[in-house]
Image: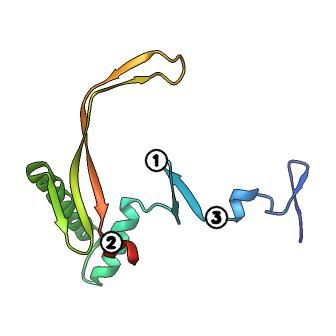
Amino acid sequence: MKLAARNGRASPYGAGGRNACVPSPLYRENGAYHAGRPMNKTQFVRELQRELGDGVTPRQAERALNAVLDTIARSVLRRSLVKFRGFGSFSIKRRRARVVRHPENGSKLFVHESSTMKFRPSSRLWKK
């Protein structure tokens, strides 16, 4: 194995260090590990445009995506549950008010009640 010098030390990963040559097989988000890298909206729009075909511009693909996301958000807020068979369901999760400890000084803090959107994938989606 050829070793590249880095900061006066030999590194089996090359001059850029471990993270420069070897992409991480897992990334961590919200305490959970996931395979691959997260996809941002721009990347998703490009993928959607490719899937829809040659006649669709990136702007049209983005407008379509925004329309779908806005419709899901409005529907969840009105009905509190939106289901797509074979894909999953979107719902509102309510978090109760609670007392937590400040991480630095340990003092007690009151956190108000809040709501967040939750996605639950279908078992069919998990099997893919």
The local crowd at label 2, few if under 14, some if 14 to 19, many if 20 or more residues have their Cα within 10 Å, is few
- Residue bearing the label numbered 3: 23
Query: x, y (%) of residue 11?
Result: 85, 58
Q: Which labelled disc corresponds to residue 30?
A: 1
Q: Who comes first in sequence, dot 1 or dot 2?
A: 1
| The N terminus - image quarter | bottom right
Q: Is residue 42 above or below residue 109?
A: below
Residue at x-position 25% and y-position 49%: 117
Residue at x-position 29% and y-position 84%: 53
Q: Which labelled disc corresponds to residue 123?
A: 2
Q: Is residue 18 above or below residue 52?
A: above
Q: CA distance from mark 1 to mark 2?
A: 22 Å
**What is the secondary structure assignment of the residue under circle 1?**
loop
Q: Closest to the observer: 63 or 24?
A: 24
Q: Amino acid at mark 1?
A: Asn
Q: CA distance from mark 2 to mark 3?
A: 29 Å
In the displayed orientation, state which residue is furthest to the bottom.
54
Q: Nearer the viewer, mark 1 or mark 2?
A: 2
Q: Who comes first in sequence, dot 1 or dot 3?
A: 3
Q: Amino acid at mark 3?
A: Pro
The local crowd at label 3, few if under 14, some if 14 to 19, many if 20 or more residues have their Cα within 10 Å, is few
Q: Nearer the viewer, mark 1 or mark 3?
A: 1
Q: Who comes first in sequence, dot 2 or dot 3?
A: 3
Residue 7 left/right relative to 19: right
Q: Nearer the viewer, mark 2 or mark 3?
A: 2
